[in-house]
Structure formats: C-alpha cells, structure tokens
Amino acid sequence: EALASRDKKRSWGLFHELLDSGFSAEEIIHTLFWQVKTMLSISVSKNATDAGVKPFVYSKTKKYINKYSIDYLNLWLMLYIILGKEKI
C-alpha cells in the first residue's frame, strides 16, 4: 500500500523493517514487482475478472492507479525483466 500510494518515506521504512525481520531484498523486490504488474493489469482491465485478480485486490489497487502513469509502471516492469528476475 505504501508503494501504491507513493509514500516514499513509509515505503523506505517498511523496506528496512522487512530486511530486519529476515526477508531478503529479492523477496521484497519480487513483491514490489507483483504490485507493479497488478497495477498495470488493472489499469487496462474493465473488472477484476479481466485483470485476473480478486475483487478486493482490484478495488483497492484501482484507487492508486492514478498516482502512476502507464509509462512509469512499464519502465519498472521492464527494469525488473532486464535484470532477469521475471519472464513474462
């Protein structure tokens, strides 16, 4: 939620909390990738079924989509792919 709402300070704090709790940076980044991928999917979908997500995820994520441009989300997605973390 911190990422989706563009709350940099909270996002950074949560990142460090997760690291301190034993999560690896790779686990955290994969979760962030999932969020960006979900935001992109929802931005071009008419409903939760089209986006391939649960209605709760769809409605919650839909609130934050206007905070990011499609180009910005695509940039993050491509960066993740280029770094070899995910194959689409």
Image (spheres, helix red, strand yellow):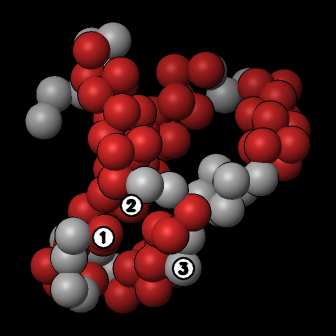
Q: Position of residue 76 (x, y in %)?
A: 41, 33
Q: Position of residue 41 (x, y in %)?
A: 25, 62
Tag 2: amino acid:
Met
| Residue at the spot of label 1 | 42
Residue that appears at 49% across and 42% down:
31
Mark 3, secondary structure of its residue: loop
Mark 3 Cα-neighbour bin, 10 Å: few <14, some 14–19, many ≥20: few
Q: Position of residue 51 (x, y in %)?
A: 21, 72
* Disc 2 from disc 3: Cα separation: 10 Å
Q: Position of residue 2 (x, y in %)?
A: 71, 56
Residues at discs 2 and 1 in contact (Cβ within 8 Å): yes
Tag 3: amino acid:
Lys
Mark 2, secondary structure of its residue: helix
* Disc 2 from disc 1: Cα separation: 5 Å
Residue 39: image tag: 2
Mark 1, secondary structure of its residue: helix
Residue 63: image tag: 3
